[in-house]
Image: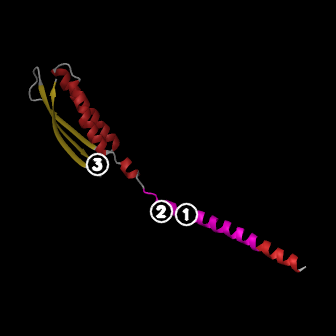
């Protein structure tokens, strides 16, 4: 009889050890899942504020509007259409974009002078540049 009680006691110690180990691992798992959101860095603000990308893209695509023109009348028309597009696009996105331009003289070649401003609640950016046509 003593042997049966002794073996039963050893068996219960093993069961208690396994059950305790499973309980500790489960508790640690849930604590780590609870703490994890505190460790994750929120990078969505960088993606949501794309003013710098828009500003650089306008600078780059202005060249396409100028270089795609065949003559002086088309040059003025293309640049004016692009200006209207950019300003409407800015209003749709919540930005105030101003693209002013001047064409001092238009002969076989012309220099188009641009002044670009982008204003939002986070960014104020401005740029002056010129593009030679053709």
In the rendered view, does 16 fall on the left or right side of 81? right
Q: Which mark is residue 38?
A: 2
**Disc 3 versus disc 1: nearer the observer:** 1
Cα–Cα gap, marks 2 and 1? 10 Å
- Which quarter of the picture shows residue 3? bottom right
Q: Is residue 54 left or right of residue 99?
A: right
Q: Is residue 80 something one can see in this rendering?
A: no
Q: Is residue 14 magenta?
A: yes
Q: Where is residue 58 in the image (x, y as percent from the top left)?
A: 26, 37
Name the one closer to the observer, 38 or 75. Answer: 38
What residue range appears in magenta?
Answer: 13-41
- Tell me the mark number nearer the camera, choosing from 2 and 1: 1
x and y, in percent, of residue 51 in the image: 30, 45
Q: Is residue 21 above or below residue 111?
A: below
Q: Bin the neighbour count of mark 1 within 10 Å (Cα to Cα): few under 14, some 14-19, many 20 and up.
A: few
Q: Distance between the residues labelled 2 and 3?
A: 30 Å
Q: Is 84 inside the magenta-drawn segment?
A: no
Quarter of the image for the C terminus: give it: top left
Residue wearing tag 1: 32
Quarter of image, res 126: top left
């Amino acid at each position: 009889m003593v042997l049966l009680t002794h073996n039963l006691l050893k068996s219960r110690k093993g069961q208690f050890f396994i059950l305790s180990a499973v309980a500790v691992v489960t508790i640690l798992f849930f604590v780590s899942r609870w703490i994890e959101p505190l460790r994750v860095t929120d990078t969505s603000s960088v993606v949501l504020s794309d003013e710098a990308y828009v500003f650089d893209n306008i600078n780059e695509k202005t060249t396409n509007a100028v270089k795609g023109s065949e003559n002086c009348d088309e040059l003025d028309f293309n640049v004016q259409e692009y200006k209207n597009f950019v300003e409407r696009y800015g209003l749709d996105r919540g930005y105030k974009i101003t693209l002013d331009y001047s064409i001092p003289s238009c002969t076989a070649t012309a220099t188009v002078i641009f002044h670009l401003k982008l204003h939002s609640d986070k960014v104020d950016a401005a740029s002056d540049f010129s593009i030679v046509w053709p």
